[in-house]
């Protein structure tokens, strides 16, 4: 019977899930979907040990402030040489180059060394060796120097470039930006392009070109436009253009040539002559950046200008063609946590460009200035401190400083992933070099004025284990969910069986309330009242009986009832029994004020003891009997007292030979099943009452129900 009941319930459950109304619920509660969601949450919160690349700090050492180091592979053997510039005296520089830790040679130059953010090495002619370029300062003049260390050949020394009068002699505000090396003649001689920009010193702010074959330096026109770094715009094999977007720093005045009270877009040819009239793209104070993108066979220039002043002016992204004609422009208000916008183009996807903001938001644009993708990085300083192939996989990595200045953030060139490392005072490091170690992993060397930081950036071999791990996480979660589901089904089956067993026991107990003898006796008594024309009393008794039957039928499918409904049922039953017994007993119910009559209790709990008190105690009395019911509460439990002054249990057993005590046995089973179902232990005690002469004078039952049910 129990198996049939369980199968029926399971069939009902499957029928429910086949219903169209519950299709959504079926999908949501699917264990495979639930496991997938949980597994994704776990995977997202796993420690960042499965990124494709990892960064480690290898060393952090103190260096002397008057020494500047660079690393570069000068002879193209796959191993970087160490380049050391040492300012021995105020106007005397010692340049030392080391190969595999051994000194190749030392060369001495006059002047003060002008630092650059990276080693400036480039081929001068068609051989495989590179030369070292650097600037020196002496007597308010800037000089260019070039040295081939492996041939021990000074290509040029103290070549005058431009006059420079520093605003502060102790802190030179010059920015030296090498940018382009390109073939210019059939002999393979390469010209070296670079820009020089200053701050409060105002001059020089120009682009220069050095031709090693003629040993001549060429200069762009005199200008106050602050050019951070020119961009090569090589639109054809015969035409070379240099493009520059200046920033509006406000160090000059309005009538100065191309004053930095405005931001300019400027285009130069290979002879550093202006190809087109410069275009004003912004006003002081504003920052600009420039990038080149491809759209099919066409080249376009992307220019950003971020206005940071108090006027209600808009910032902009502008798209120009190669003739500096404006193709499209979008404008937007400045947001304070941007500071500026940097532009970046991935060489593998030249048809797109990225905007990088200080709040870490990276937007990918197409050539129609539409955002096609967004990525969120940690807040950072927008200018990349370094870009290069650190992972030796022919892909560029970018290095940023976090906005809190205490982390280095390594970003892939498509901004698809990043890895960061704690580095206190990261903003102090201004010089970055990749130290190639042949077949071994390369190292990234960063220098500040007095400190050297060595880091490794390499492939993380745990990266390839992440997919088996993710599958394992999903499998473990799925197994756990299925186990829970199976446990819940098992508990549900036990619950159904327990409820069914309680219902069966309660039905057996109900038989005693509405057995034929009880029903016939009540109906005969009611008929007698009608016969005697006592209609009022007959109607009263009939109402009590009908209510008793109604409560019995309505609650036949319930195993629990409220305390209020149970007491209501008992009161109706007592009125009928009192009538049946010709008012042979009286009863009283005392309900304390602090009782919650809405608590759930098993059906028939109080009635069973009340019925026993009447049937086995009060009915056999020769004189009138009394039944007292009281419900009270203490701090831990409810207490229900059922007391009668009947003949007592021992005498009742001697009179009622057929009394088997089945009612209490059934109740005991119900209470045990109720505990299995609800985890609430209801207990009761039965005591015999005696008079002064130790004679039985009644029975007392105390039922205790825990409050925290």
Image (cartoon, rainbow, N blue to C red):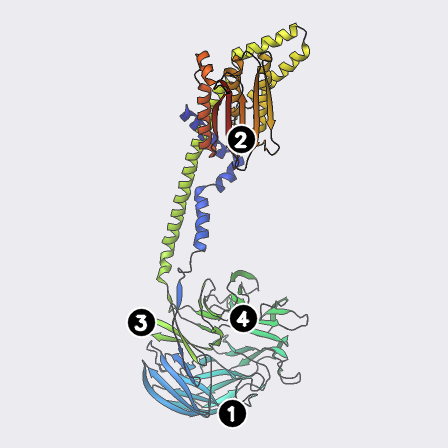
Residue drawn at the location 51% of the way across and 27% of the way down: 702
CA gap, disc 2 to disc 3?
A: 85 Å
Residue 441, quarter of picture: bottom left
Query: Considering only order in the chain, which callout, 3 or 4, is on the residue closer to the N terminus?
Result: 4
* SS at badge 4: strand
Residue 460 in sight from this viewpoint = yes
Query: Considering only order in the chain, which callout, 1 or 4, is on the residue closer to the N terminus?
Result: 1
Q: How many marks?
A: 4
Nearest the camera: 550 or 344?
Answer: 550
Q: Where is residue 190 shown, x and y percent of the image? A: 43, 83
Residue drawn at the location 36% of the way across and 53% of the way down: 468
Q: Which residue is mark 3?
A: 439
CA gap, disc 2 to disc 1?
A: 104 Å
Query: Considering only order in the chain, which callout, 2 or 4, is on the residue closer to the N terminus?
Result: 4
Asked whether disc 3 touches disc 1, contact meaning CB atoms under 8 Å apart, the reply is no
Q: Where is residue 356 shown, x and y percent of the image? A: 53, 67
CA gap, disc 4 to disc 3?
A: 34 Å
Q: Which of the two marks, 4 or 2, is nearer to us in this view?
A: 2
10 Å crowding of disc 4: few (<14), some (14-19), many (20+): many
Q: Which residue is mark 2?
A: 639
* SS at badge 3: loop
Query: Considering only order in the chain, which callout, 3 or 2, is on the residue closer to the N terminus?
Result: 3
Q: Which residue is mark 4?
A: 342
* SS at badge 2: strand
Image height of 102 relative to 19, above or below = below
Q: Which residue is mark 1?
A: 141
Asked whether disc 4 touches disc 1, contact meaning CB atoms under 8 Å apart, the reply is no
Residue 314, quarter of picture: bottom right
CA gap, disc 4 to disc 2?
A: 77 Å
Q: Which of the two marks, 2 or 1, is nearer to us in this view?
A: 2
CA gap, disc 3 to disc 1?
A: 43 Å
């Amino acid at each position: 019977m129990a198996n049939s009941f369980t199968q029926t319930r399971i069939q009902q459950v499957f029928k429910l899930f086949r219903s169209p109304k519950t299709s959504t619920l079926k999908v949501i509660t699917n264990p495979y979907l639930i496991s997938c969601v949980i597994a994704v949450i776990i995977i997202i919160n796993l420690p960042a040990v499965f990124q494709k690349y990892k960064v480690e700090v290898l060393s952090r050492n103190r260096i002397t402030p008057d020494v500047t180091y660079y690393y570069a592979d000068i002879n193209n053997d796959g191993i970087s040489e160490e380049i050391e510039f040492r300012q021995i005296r105020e106007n005397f520089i010692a340049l030392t180059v080391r190969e595999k830790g051994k000194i190749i040679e030392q060369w001495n130059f006059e002047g003060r060394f002008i630092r650059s953010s990276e080693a400036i090495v480039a081929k001068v002619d068609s051989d495989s060796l590179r030369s070292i370029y650097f600037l020196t300062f002496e007597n308010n003049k800037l000089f260019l120097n070039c040295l081939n260390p492996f041939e021990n050949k000074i290509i040029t020394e103290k070549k005058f470039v431009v006059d420079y009068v520093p605003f502060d002699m102790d802190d030179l505000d010059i920015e030296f930006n090498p940018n382009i090396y390109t073939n210019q003649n059939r002999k393979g001689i390469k010209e070296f392009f670079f820009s020089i920009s200053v701050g409060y010193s105002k001059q020089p702010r120009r682009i220069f070109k050095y031709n090693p074959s003629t040993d001549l330096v060429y200069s762009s026109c005199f200008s106050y436009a602050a050019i951070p770094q020119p961009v090569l715009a090589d639109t054809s094999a015969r035409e070379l253009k240099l493009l520059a977007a200046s920033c509006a720093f406000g160090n000059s005045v309005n009538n100065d040539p191309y004053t930095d009270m405005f931001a300019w877009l400027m285009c130069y040819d290979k002879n550093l002559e202006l190809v087109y009239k410069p275009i004003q793209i912004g006003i002081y104070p504003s920052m600009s950046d420039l990038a080149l993108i491809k759209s099919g066979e066409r080249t376009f220039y992307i220019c950003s200008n971020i206005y940071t002043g108090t006027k209600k002016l808009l910032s902009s992204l502008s798209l120009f063609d190669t003739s500096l004609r404006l193709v499209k422009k979008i404008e937007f208000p400045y947001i304070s946590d941007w500071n500026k916008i940097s532009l970046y183009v991935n060489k593998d996807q030249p048809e797109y460009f990225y905007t990088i903001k200080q709040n870490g938001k990276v937007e990918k644009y197409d050539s129609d200035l539409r955002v096609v993708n967004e990525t969120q990085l940690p807040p950072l300083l927008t200018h990349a401190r370094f870009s290069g192939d650190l992972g030796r996989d022919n892909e560029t990595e970018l290095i940023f400083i976090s906005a809190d200045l205490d982390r280095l953030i390594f970003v892939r060139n498509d901004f698809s992933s990043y890895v960061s490392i704690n580095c206190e005072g990261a903003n102090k490091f201004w010089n970055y070099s990749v130290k190639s170690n042949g077949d071994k992993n390369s190292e990234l060397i960063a220098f500040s004025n007095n400190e050297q930081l060595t880091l490794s950036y390499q492939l993380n071999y745990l990266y390839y284990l992440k997919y088996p791990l993710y599958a394992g996480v999903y499998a473990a979660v799925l197994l756990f969910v299925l186990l829970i589901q199976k446990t819940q089904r098992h508990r549900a089956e036990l619950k159904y069986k327990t409820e069914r067993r309680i219902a069966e026991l309660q039905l057996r107990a109900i038989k005693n309330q509405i057995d034929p003898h009880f029903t016939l006796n009540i109906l005969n008594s009611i008929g007698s009242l009608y016969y005697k024309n006592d209609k009022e009393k007959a109607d009263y008794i009939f109402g009590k009986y009908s209510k008793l039957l109604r409560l019995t039928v309505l609650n036949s499918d319930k195993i629990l009832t409220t305390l209020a409904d149970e007491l209501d049922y008992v009161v109706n039953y007592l009125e009928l029994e009192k009538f049946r017994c010709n008012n042979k007993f009286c009863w009283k119910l005392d309900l304390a004020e602090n009782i919650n009559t809405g608590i759930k209790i098993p059906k028939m709990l109080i009635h069973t003891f009340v019925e026993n008190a009447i049937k086995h105690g009060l009915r056999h009395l020769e004189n009138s009997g009394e039944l007292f019911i009281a419900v009270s509460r203490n701090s831990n439990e409810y207490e229900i007292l059922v007391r009668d002054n009947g003949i007592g249990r021992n005498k009742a057993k001697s009179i009622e030979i057929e009394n088997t005590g089945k009612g209490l046995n059934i109740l005991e089973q119900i209470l045990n099943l109720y505990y299995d179902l609800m985890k609430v232990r209801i207990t009761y005690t039965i005591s015999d009452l005696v008079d002064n002469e130790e004679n039985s004078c009644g029975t007392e039952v105390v039922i205790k129900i825990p409050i925290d049910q």
